Image (cartoon, rainbow, N blue to C red):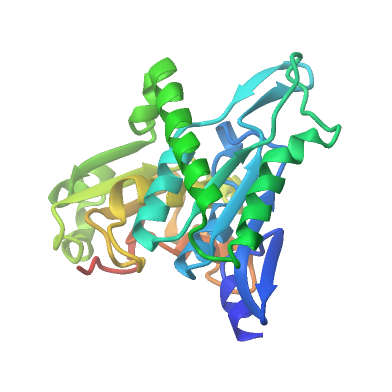
């Protein structure tokens, strides 16, 4: 089915609801709190749904107890909510975060009551004839905004970029990455004044991987770069920088093969900078 094939081009969502053989809603459900290495997981499939003008619901715990030797409470990285808001604004489609609640001990609620909010949200969706914008979605958006503001007030670092991401003048990319020999490649990006550089500390022996980095790139893209519905629509370049990996080794480990998830590396960045070379993927367009 062409509509489904296009929707799963980046990754496969958990649930795709169809009406008259056309996708009307994408739903993701996970027990993982989006923090640390988990924050960027599943982003590609959510982004593709929004790009395809299909509403998205991600159902997950905003906070929960992590088990194991170093048991502790994990808390959502609030940048995710800001990225969802930007995706909604750019694509004019709901991208909703619904909380899976926990009990007084931090354990996820599993008695059935945990689904009350998403059940009500879906019921309203169906009662409104699967409209792209429905009343309960607006209410969730209001609660997401309040949640973001509350978390940023408690942890101000979420209101800015992490240390691995810097905004630099595009003309200084050669100096910033130490790749002055690639001046002709860097010059292709100078149509926009600034660039977001996401430094990824992978090494050559451990560079065959996607999560969390391919998902995180979308978060930083929507927080700082994207200003239109196409991946070329950016106010800043997005540069993925691998200072410890050569271009040859990276491509060997992560080919741009649509049948492999490694193709997600190539979906939105303007350029990749390696230890020895630069690869330009696309140029910004208005």
Residue drawn at x 66%, y 39% is 60
Q: Is residue 177 above or below residue 122?
A: above
Residue drawn at x 52%, y 42% is 140
Looking at the image, how many numbered discs can be counted on the residues?
0
- Tell me residue 229's x, y (percent): 35, 66
Q: Is residue 55 above or below residue 159?
A: below
- Quarter of the image for residue 59 reads top right
**The C terminus lies in quadrant:** bottom left
Q: Tell me: 266 left or right of 204.
A: left
- Tell me residue 117's x, y (percent): 67, 40
Q: Residue furthest right?
A: 111
- Quarter of the image for residue 164 reads top left
- Tell me residue 45's x, y (percent): 58, 60
- Tell me residue 53's x, y (percent): 48, 68
Residue drawn at x 33%, y 53% is 239
Q: Is residue 283 above or below residue 236?
A: below
Q: Is residue 206 visible?
A: yes
Q: Nearer the viewer, residue 48 or 141?
A: 141
**The N terminus lies in quadrant:** bottom right
Q: Tell me: 13 left or right of 114.
A: left
Q: Nearer the viewer, residue 41 or 102?
A: 102
Q: Is residue 64 above or below residue 270?
A: above
Q: Nearer the viewer, residue 211 or 138?
A: 138
Q: Is residue 202 visible?
A: no
Q: Residue furthest bottom?
A: 2
Residue drawn at x 24%, y 65% is 284
């Amino acid at each position: 089915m062409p509509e489904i094939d296009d929707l799963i081009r980046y990754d496969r969502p958990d649930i795709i609801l169809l009406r008259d053989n056309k996708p009307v809603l994408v739903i993701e459900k996970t027990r993982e709190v989006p923090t640390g290495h988990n924050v960027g997981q599943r982003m590609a499939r959510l982004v593709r749904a929004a790009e395809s003008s299909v509403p998205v619901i991600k159902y997950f715990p905003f906070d929960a107890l992590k088990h194991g030797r170093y048991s502790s409470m994990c808390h959502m990285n609030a940048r995710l909510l800001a990225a969802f808001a930007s995706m909604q604004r750019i694509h004019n489609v709901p991208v909703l975060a619904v909380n899976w609640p926990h009990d007084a001990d931090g354990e996820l609620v599993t008695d059935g009551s945990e689904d009350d909010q998403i059940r009500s949200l879906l019921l309203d969706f169906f009662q409104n004839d699967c409209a792209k914008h429905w009343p309960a979605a607006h209410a969730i958006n209001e609660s997401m905004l309040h949640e973001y503001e509350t978390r940023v007030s408690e942890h101000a670092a979420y209101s800015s970029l992490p240390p691995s991401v810097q905004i630099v003048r595009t003309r200084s990319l050669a100096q910033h990455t130490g790749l002055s020999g690639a001046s002709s490649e860097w010059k292709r990006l100078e149509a926009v004044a600034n660039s977001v550089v996401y430094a990824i500390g992978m090494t050559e022996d451990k560079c065959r991987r996607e999560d969390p980095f391919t998902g995180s790139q979308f978060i930083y893209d929507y927080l700082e770069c994207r200003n239109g519905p196409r991946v070329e629509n950016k106010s800043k370049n997005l540069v993925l920088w691998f200072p410890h990996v050569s271009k040859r080794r990276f491509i060997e480990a992560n080919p741009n093969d649509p049948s492999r998830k490694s193709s997600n590396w190539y979906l939105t960045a303007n350029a990749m900078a390696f230890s020895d070379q630069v690869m330009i993927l696309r140029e910004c367009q208005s």
